[in-house]
Amino acid sequence: MTKAQKLTHLPTLTNWVTNTVQRADDGQYYHRRLEENLNIRSNIIQELQILVQQAHEDARQKLRNLSGISSSLDPIEEEETPGIDSSIIDEFPRYLELKTLKGYFGEIMAAVVAENFNPFDEDWRVFAFPFRLHQTAYHALEQVRQKGGSAPTIIGRLGDDMLAFQCDDQGKITHVLFCEAKCTAYHNTQLIAEAHQKSSDGKLIPNDCLFLIEILQDYANVSLEAAKWIHSLRHLWWSKNNPTHERCDLINYICGLPPAKASTEIISISAPHSAYTAKRRLEAVEIHLHDVNGLVEEVYQAISQPIICSLNEAELLSLWDKVIVHIPPRHQLLIRENCHLLSCNEEEAVIGVRLLPNFRDIQRQISKLQNAFQISSNFMPSQSQKMREKGQFGRNAYGHARTITQPLHVNTSC
């Protein structure tokens, strides 16, 4: 790596999102809004796939090294362990739950913001993705390797979501940017509050300081810059009694469905959120994307498990006609012209949305679709389970269905 090289590289980034920045008069608070241009969607997906592959290759290579897999296996070892299948490592983390992949994507996008949009009008450097240290993800890998099937639900990674740095000519770290990332298919005010509350903690030295050193040590023999950063991070870690660097905070909030009213303020543009109690410089970033879950699944080329459906095509069409009549009349035309029932069972329905620009309009009808399924008398409602929208979108399992794109999952029971 060279000094000028970025960890995140997206050539069409500035065409993909429009960048609007508001600065408070005191210079302590910045608000940034990034809004997606759908015309660039196909190009950016290819670039994001490359970026995601690179971001996780570090973890895959670590797993290969630990398991004894290399580009050319020792002939003796190959005889002792014939038929070595490294696909479980090669496909990591594609088979993890969508919630986990969204967490990773949020952290990657925080790095993209830090390196490409210059928070606080300053240059920042990201040199490693801390999610290589997500131990429960490796436990999930091992369960899939031994038992097959879907990956189990895992807890999120502890520690700092993403870290960016500034360094002086002497190699001393002068600024640390603590990034808190959230990624949701819908607008979620609780996530915003949680992010600001977490960012308010008083620590000046990152929790993952030594673990970042561990990651960099793998490259210290081939990269002079990695060796220099190790020295800088060690100096930072030992400075706890006499810190001279500045901590700054960044909230990175990815949202798939902003409020219907454009005038609704999602994150304050003039002052920090009430949950942020620190007295530091803060930049809050909103990234508004269409079909967040579908985008993440496509970027990760996720291995998803389709729901079990016993209905044939004609039966699905008949069921869909029965459901639609229970949609309020003013919304029936929107649903009928833009949606098609792809799959269904007693708990879940997969509805295809034909055009991505209409996806948000359909998302806003989720509760009406849930209600229509329930009152159409095709399912037995469960009193112990609350109605919920499961938030699962993706093309991989259902993208073959005629002209249908953007499959959307709806919970059909309550």
Image (tube, rainbow, N blue to C red):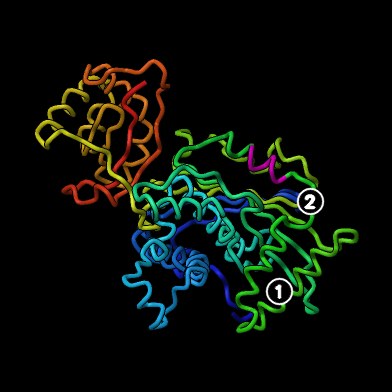
Q: Which residues are magenta?
A: 194-199
User: How much space separates mark 2 and mark 1, taking CA atoms?
Assistant: 21 Å
Q: Is residue 120 magenta?
A: no
Q: Quadrant of the C terminus?
A: top left
| Callouts 2 and 1 close, C-beta under 8 Å | no
Asked whether, in this view, residue 262 is left or right of residue 317, the answer is right
Main SS of the magenta part reads helix
Residue 203: which numbered mark, if any? 2
Where residue 165 sits in the image (x, y, percent)?
Answer: 70, 65
Q: Secondary structure at mark 2?
A: loop
Q: Amino acid at mark 2?
A: Lys
Front position in the image: 173 or 145:
145
From this view, report whether residue 290 is shown above or below residue 212: above
Q: Is residue 197 magenta?
A: yes
For marks 2 and 1 on the same chain, the one whose residue lies earlier in the sequence: 2
Asked where in the image residue 316 lies, by quadrant, the reply is top left
Residue pointed to by mark 1: 229
